[in-house]
């Protein structure tokens, strides 16, 4: 557990370093897989860091819960061994004596440990999947480092595949399934049966070793991640200004137009972009009803990236303080 906690801290440091490096590297944010509004790549990394802070707290809490021992006899009543012996042995092993036990420590402790590992693995899978999406040919905003001599495909020499991230996504499924097995182990017959024992002999080393491996692999991926700023800018502009539709909607509402009327104006011009291929601002300038409310200077302001970045410093202070 100590190694896993240290590994989590190492991953957090790698994420933090890259977050500050790309604090103002502007890219498109996506919801439902569709272009939404501008964010920065550093912001995306800061989200991961915030989640890893919660993982670290869960790991430390799970370490506390699992660091207990018992030597209380066949059913936990200390019939043949006094509590003082249990306390002495636990102290020698760096454990605390359980306040009460049966023939075993109750398996809710183990379930919490394995669940903490599973949630951590889920976070790493989330990060890995994002990297895989960003490396897709159609997106290509970031990709795993590709070492000299590495082969992306034995059949297609042109390929660079996100194999490290895919590996992490697959292993997360194992760790997650092991957490379910640990929760199944909680319900034992009376003061103990051994239905949990065979399960723990597998999931104990498996989950612990896998999470340790995943942490080191993902840390290496984050450190070596290749970021394509130019491609991010290209994708940001792909919708020809449609990403500023909400700013326009809000401005019209502030000027006294009903929200529904403002929505209709913005939407009809947005749909023209899809139909004609012309940029959004050109259609807006041709809309006489809209231009009765706004000037061309107003539109230039509405189409500004800085509007979306004004709180990046404050967000970073909240995350990394």
Image: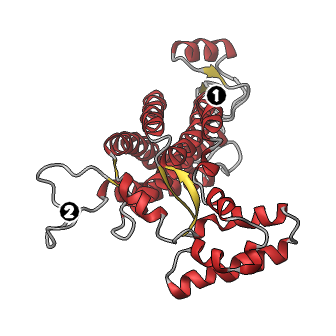
| Circle count | 2
Image quadrant holding the C terminus, namely top right
Q: Is residue 31 visible?
A: no
- Which of the two residues, 58 or 106, is positioned nearer the viewer here? 58
Which quadrant would residue 106 be assigned to in this image?
top right
**Identity of the residue drawn at 56% across and 52% down:** 39
Mark 2 nearby-residue class (10 Å; few <14, some 14–19, many ≥20): some
Q: Position of residue 217 (x, y in %)?
A: 34, 44
- Which of the two residues, 221 or 22, is positioned nearer the viewer here? 22
Q: Position of residue 112 (x, y in %)?
A: 62, 42
Q: Residue furthest bottom?
A: 275
Q: Position of residue 275 (x, y in %)?
A: 55, 88
Horizontal side of 279 relative to 168 (left or right) equals right
Name the residue that disc number 1 marks.
Answer: 73
Q: Who comes first in sequence, dot 1 or dot 2? A: 1
- Which of the two residues, 80 or 197, is positioned nearer the viewer here? 197
Helix or strand or loop: what does disc 1 sit on? Answer: loop
The correct choice, above or below, for 318 with respect to 275 in the image is above
Mark 1 nearby-residue class (10 Å; few <14, some 14–19, many ≥20): some
The correct choice, above or below, for 104 with respect to 218 in the image is above
Which quadrant would residue 281 be assigned to in this image?
bottom right
The correct choice, above or below, for 12 with respect to 251 in the image is above
Helix or strand or loop: what does disc 2 sit on? Answer: loop
Name the residue that disc number 2 marks.
Answer: 152
Which quadrant would residue 296 be assigned to in this image?
bottom right
């Amino acid at each position: 557990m100590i190694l896993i906690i240290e590994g989590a801290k190492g991953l957090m440091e790698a994420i933090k370093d890259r977050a500050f490096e790309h604090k103002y590297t502007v890219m498109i944010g996506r919801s439902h897989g569709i272009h939404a509004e501008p964010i920065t790549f550093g912001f995306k990394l800061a989200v991961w860091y915030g989640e890893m802070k919660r993982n670290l707290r869960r790991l430390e809490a799970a370490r506390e819960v699992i660091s207990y021992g018992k030597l209380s006899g066949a059913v936990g009543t200390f019939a043949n061994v006094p509590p003082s012996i249990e306390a002495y042995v636990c102290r020698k092993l760096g454990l605390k004596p359980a306040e009460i036990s049966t023939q075993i420590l109750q398996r809710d402790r183990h379930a919490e440990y394995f669940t903490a590992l599973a949630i951590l693995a889920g976070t790493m899978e989330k990060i890995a999947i994002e990297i895989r999406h960003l490396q897709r040919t159609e997106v290509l905003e970031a990709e795993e480092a590709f070492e000299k001599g590495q082969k992306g495909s034995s059949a297609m020499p042109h390929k660079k595949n996100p194999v490290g991230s895919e590996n992490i996504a697959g292993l997360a499924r194992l760790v997650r399934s092991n957490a379910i097995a640990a929760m199944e182990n909680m319900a034992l017959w009376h003061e103990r049966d051994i239905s949990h024992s065979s399960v723990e002999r597998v999931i104990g080393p498996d989950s612990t070793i896998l999470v340790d491996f995943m942490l080191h692999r993902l840390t290496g991926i984050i450190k070596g991640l290749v970021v394509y700023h130019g491609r991010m800018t290209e994708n940001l502009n792909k919708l020809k200004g449609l990403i500023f539709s909400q700013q326009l909607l809000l401005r019209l509402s502030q000027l006294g137009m009903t929200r529904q009327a403002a929505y209709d104006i913005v939407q009809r011009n947005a749909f023209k972009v899809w139909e004609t291929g012309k940029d959004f601002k050109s259609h807006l300038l041709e809309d006489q009803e809209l231009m009765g409310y706004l000037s061309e200077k107003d539109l230039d302001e509405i189409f500004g990236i800085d509007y979306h970045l004004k709180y990046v410093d404050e967000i970073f202070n909240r995350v990394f303080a």
